Amino acid sequence: TGILLAVASVGAWQWWQGKQVSDSREAANQYQIFVQAIEKNDSAKADVLGEAVIKNYAKTDFAFLAALRLAKYQSGLGKSDLALVVLEKANAVANTDSNKELVQIRIAQLYVAQGKLNDASAKLKTFKPQYFPAGYAEIQGDIALAKGNRDQAATFYLSALKQLDATAGSRQLIELKLSEAGGIYSDSQTEIR
């Protein structure tokens, strides 16, 4: 009976491994179809497919990616309230602390875009940035600038720039925001007016 149990255990393990690979492939395929719907600007199809990936493949990274992408797409269409709901789903399927932090930052960014500055500030107070401190500081700058506090905004943008790699894609935008706030950034010196 011990041999039969060992054979059954190995068989079950192999079946489980095969199912994991199959599920991952299917999630990747469904995610790609979802992305194509977004690229074709097929809103109805993108919504349905994105929600399906989030629901059916919640234990995969594809669910998290689909939620982030769907939220961005909905926000771009002016559906901010739906985007917030999807970001909460992203948080539910996030399987790492860095992913959870990223979702909180995206929610705060969406609140700033909606002009809900107090909500954005409150969201930032719910966590301490460990993985995306530059993004956190940038949002603090956005909030300060929106409230008319240019000096404080410049300080936050400067902090964000100091935490970014020189080749970071968001660097130019933050430098532009710093300039708008009245600050100047250069590699050799920094000035806030």
Image: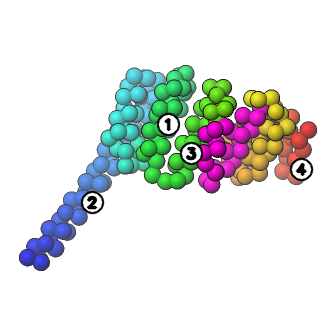
Q: Is residue 184 above or below residue 9?
A: above
Indicate which disc residue 17 carries.
2
Indicate which disc residue 35 carries.
none
Circle nearer the N terminus (2, 3): 2
Q: Residues within 10 Å of mark 4 (few under 14, many from 20)?
A: few
Circle nearer the N terminus (1, 4): 1
Circle nearer the N terminus (3, 1): 1
Q: Residues within 10 Å of mark 2 (few under 14, many from 20)?
A: few
Amino acid at pointer 3: Leu
Q: Is residue 27 left or right of residue 12?
A: right
Amino acid at pointer 2: Gln
Closer to viewer: mark 3 or mark 4: 3
Quarter-wise, where is residue 37 in the image? Answer: top left
* Magenta segment boundaries in residue numbering: 121-145
Circle nearer the N terminus (2, 4): 2
Residue 62: percent from left, percent from top: 41, 44
Give the residue pinned by disc 1.
Answer: 87
Give the residue pinned by disc 3.
Answer: 102
Q: Examine the rendering and report whether any part of residue 73 can be seen.
A: no
Amino acid at pointer 1: Leu
Mark 1 lies on a secondary structure that is helix
Q: Examine the rendering and report whether any part of residue 83 can be seen.
A: yes
Q: CA distance from mark 2 to mark 4?
A: 55 Å
Q: CA distance from mark 3 to mark 4?
A: 30 Å
Specify the principal SS of the magenta part: helix
- Residue at x 10%, y 73% (from the top left corner): 4
Magenta residue check for 144: yes
Amino acid at pointer 4: Gln
- Residue at x 44%, y 44% (from the top left corner): 92
Give the residue pinned by disc 4.
Answer: 189
